Image: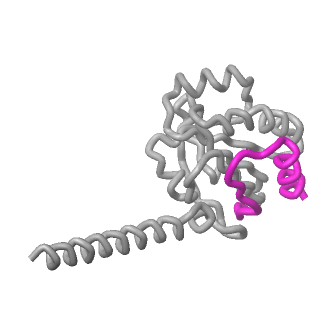
Amino acid sequence: MGKYRKKVQVVVLLAVLIIGGYAIFQSFQNNDSNNLIKIGQPAPDFRLANLNNEPVALSDYIGTPLVINFWGTFCEPCIREIPSFQKQYEKWNEQGLEIIGINLSEDSLTVSNYMRRFNMTYPVVRDVDRKTEKKYGLRSYPTTFFVKADGTLQAAVVGEMTEKQIEEHIQQLMK
């Protein structure tokens, strides 16, 4: 009786390991790069509120090269990037470039405090229900999308960028 019980336990354990391994494998198959919108595709539209509760939509930027940066105050790499985005905004805005920061569902007070702290002058909106984040396929932060004037995606970068990397992407976008 004991040998039979031991065999059943081993079979159950193997089944659990196989099912668990399969589940883990599937989660790795659905990684960041597989879910992000693809280069050449239209950027998904969104309609979000800025800190004054005014609506801002992607369609407001049709005909304009646009950088969309998803960030959060809880994200150290995001915070390190903000001064670089601000410098690039100041450098390129008069030539037609727009940058929009999409904050990931934090309250207005927290976001406005960070904007003041870093002297952010480019628009920031809040993705309160995180629907826009899902449309864009985000899995980690920061994630930045470079959108051509025709509304199609030129590049997507998951993770922190240096100011030089940001500028190189913007130069390509402005051609």
Instruction: Out of 160 and 150, give the one closest to the viewer.
Output: 160
Q: Position of residue 66 (x, y in %)?
A: 74, 50
User: In the image as oriented, which residue stretches furthest toward the front?
Assistant: 2
Q: Position of residue 57 (x, y in %)?
A: 59, 48
Looking at the figure, which quarter contains the N terminus?
bottom left
| Quadrant in the rendering for residue 88 | top right
Q: Position of residue 64 (x, y in %)?
A: 77, 52
- Residue at image position (66%, 26%) is 115
Instruction: Out of 46 and 114, give the one closest to the viewer.
Output: 114
- Residue at image position (71%, 68%) is 39
In the visual, does 68 lie left or right of 21? right
**Does residue 110 lie above or below 102 as drawn?**
above
**Does residue 69 lie above or below 8 as drawn?**
above
In the visual, does 40 lie left or right of 24? right
- Specify start and end residues of the magenta stretch as a single range: 150-175
Looking at the figure, which quarter contains the C terminus?
bottom right
